[in-house]
Amino acid sequence: MPKHKHASYANETITLENAHIRLELFKRRTGWGWGELFSASGKFMAVLDHFGELMLRDQEIPMRLEAQDYRREQGEFGERLVFKVASLVMKDKLRGTSFESWINYPLEQHCLEGEVTITLEPNAPVLQLSYKLKSNANQYARYIRGPWLKVGQDGFGSEKTDAIFPGIEWLEGREWSSGTDWFKDPWAQRFVPHPNKIAIPVMALSHGGVGIGLAWNPRQHASGWFNNPRHHPQAAFASPNFIDRRENHLLGLMLPEVQLEALENQVYAEPPLELHKEQWIEFEAEVFLVEGDSLAVVSDWVKRHGLPEITARWSLPEALERIATAYNSHLWHEGKGFGTTQTPGDIRSTVPRFLEGYIARNPASELARGLQAKLEWCRQQEPKKPDQDALLERGLKLISYQREDGSFPFDPDGRHYAKDDFVVAREFLEPMGLAQDTALDMGALAALELLELFAATQDSRCRDAAQGALEWCLPLTRPEGGDFWETPLHAPNLLAAGHAAVAYYLGFKVFSEPRYLERATHWIRCLLPFTHLWEPSDKPMLYNTKPCLCASDWYFANWVRDHVQWEVLETFALSLRHGIDWAQVDPELDWRRYHLGVTLAATRWMIDHNDQNWLPHNLPDSLELYRAGMFDACFPDTHNTTTGLYGGMAIPPDVIAVNLLGLLEREES
């Protein structure tokens, strides 16, 4: 008997199963059309609600697609079931009932017909779903639903361990998707988001050690007609399922696609989707299970599908040469140092981090000689480097902030005061984080610095305090606390993941503790849900990254819509500084390709004033400097996923050059 109690059952069941997954499909009284999904251990994970569903503009009852029979096929592809489906004809279903005399739906034919194929891969917990449908009439659809998973339905309900919708959501426990934990409306609403905001085309949820994913091809042409705009599969995600107001979680694909940001979050589309006779509607998707949490689901998808290749704007040496040229020309200010002149204090005598490495690679070039002279001038301005006593004093000061349990508290009005964003948000709306609270990045940053100080001083107090911080962070699973100067403290955050990955790897090297190596791997994989591993055909954004899944100051910059690249670059610059090669630490994933990808993406960001694709927002006076080419080779603070344009401040490209040098050195070795 089926576990799902919200569908009629005609006492017929068929099963697809292997050693890893089982799908039981059931026949309604009106035809085949829904299923229940189980893990290898027998855990009931989800209900496949139907084989498709159509809601027309002029009919308030949705029409499911169902089949009267099926065929089973086997081969090298595994095993599959093929259903010839058609949408219900409501007029027929009401005939002979008490409703017939007072409800008259004029449609007397199937609005949609086609095939739904479910393929079970031979030795993997993966189901391939294929929907190939056609419209039989000119009609207007409020929605066409394809794969529609209700996870937890009639099982664990609305409980979950965690859920990840890459680039959109990272939830734990009882947190709601589209919640106002880290946003204020209307940005909090993101249950049917603009597709460009989705970083990886997979929705993931876990419960009790089993994770489930629904993945699709976001560039698939799911429907189109004549010269009208093409539509791609549109994701819908709600945890818990507030769309249906049921005790489950929704992972679904539908049409129409959101093509304008202003039309997001419509489950019943307005304007509706215009369908024509013989118009095709197709969905291709996969449903899969893994052992572990939602990050394991995302990581499994990356392992099976691989990391994408990226087209380089320039070769690595040419990009490096452009940056070096900028530092030797418009980013140099004689007698003052390097900088962009956007704000007072931009120009400093600090030596750019890549300069020595670049000069060492090109000792005989005229450009290197020019940079060498500038480097020597900066060296003369540098303050004396701290001695052992000063380093130890710094370490003991840091240790004084540590609690007995190993944690480090958040002090927004004290040592964590960097900008007045926290003060403004607290006064006008609500705090972004409470004083004396803590998060991953508070501990990871402290552990990282203490391990560096231990390496420099060999003082055991720094080592022991670092271990205390690492131990306190061990139970944490979601990266939080980075960007604390302008975003909610507990929002999912890329920078925190990077800091924690490096801190735990350094901890592993010092303490030889296997748990630390496992956590280092976990935290570096936490970069994936923030990283764009696909791009639309008209807006290059492959390997662009989200800094966090929240809004700064609750209501300013929207970090679900906008990319930021400097944080992932700093993660790998920090890794290079400590000699960490993530491809050796975590060989299951191609971290060298990932590092190359995020760096080449950054070169795509590099400003050329002739492109006219960047505008400042908080420093409007800098627009004339941009037009004069004074920011060329710098890179912008933000990229908008929906417009494809850049904005914010111009960031000096030093960190890009550091990563270019690191990639070149590894390539050559």
Image: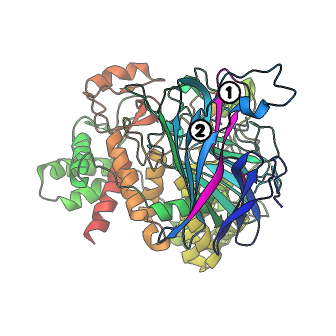
Image quadrant containing the C terminus: bottom left
Q: Position of residue 608 (x, y in %)?
A: 27, 33
User: Between residues 645 and 316, which one lies in front from this camera angle?
Assistant: 645
User: Between residues 90 and 656, which one lies in front from this camera angle?
Assistant: 90
Residue type, mark 1 in image: Val
Residue 382 seen: no
In the image, residue 658 sits, relative to residue 486, either above or below, namely: below
User: As drawn, is 645 to the left or to the right of 181?
Assistant: left
User: As drawn, is 661 to the left or to the right of 8?
Assistant: left
Q: Residue furthest right?
A: 98
Residue type, mark 2 in image: Met
| Magenta stretch prevailing secondary structure | strand
Q: Where is residue 293 in the image (x, y as percent from the top left)?
A: 67, 62
Q: Where is residue 343 in the image (x, y as percent from the top left)?
A: 42, 28
- Range of magenta residues: 47-72
Q: Circles 1 and 2: CB distance less than 8 Å?
A: no
Q: Position of residue 432 (x, y in %)?
A: 71, 37
Residue at image x 25%, y 24%?
628
Using the image, tell me which numbered label, if any, was put on residue 424. Answer: 1
In the image, residue 79 sits, relative to residue 262, either above or below, namely: below
Q: Is residue 55 magenta?
A: yes
Using the image, tell me which numbered label, if any, was put on residue 254. Answer: 2
Q: Earlier in the sequence, mark 1 or mark 2?
A: 2
The local crowd at label 1, few if under 14, some if 14 to 19, many if 20 or more residues have their Cα within 10 Å, is: some
User: Between residues 485 and 290, which one lies in front from this camera angle?
Assistant: 290
For label 1, the SS is: helix
Residue 31 seen: yes
Residue at image x 74%, y 64%?
406
For label 2, the SS is: strand
In the image, residue 196 sits, relative to residue 403, either above or below, namely: above
Q: On the image, which quarter does residue 555 sit in?
A: top right
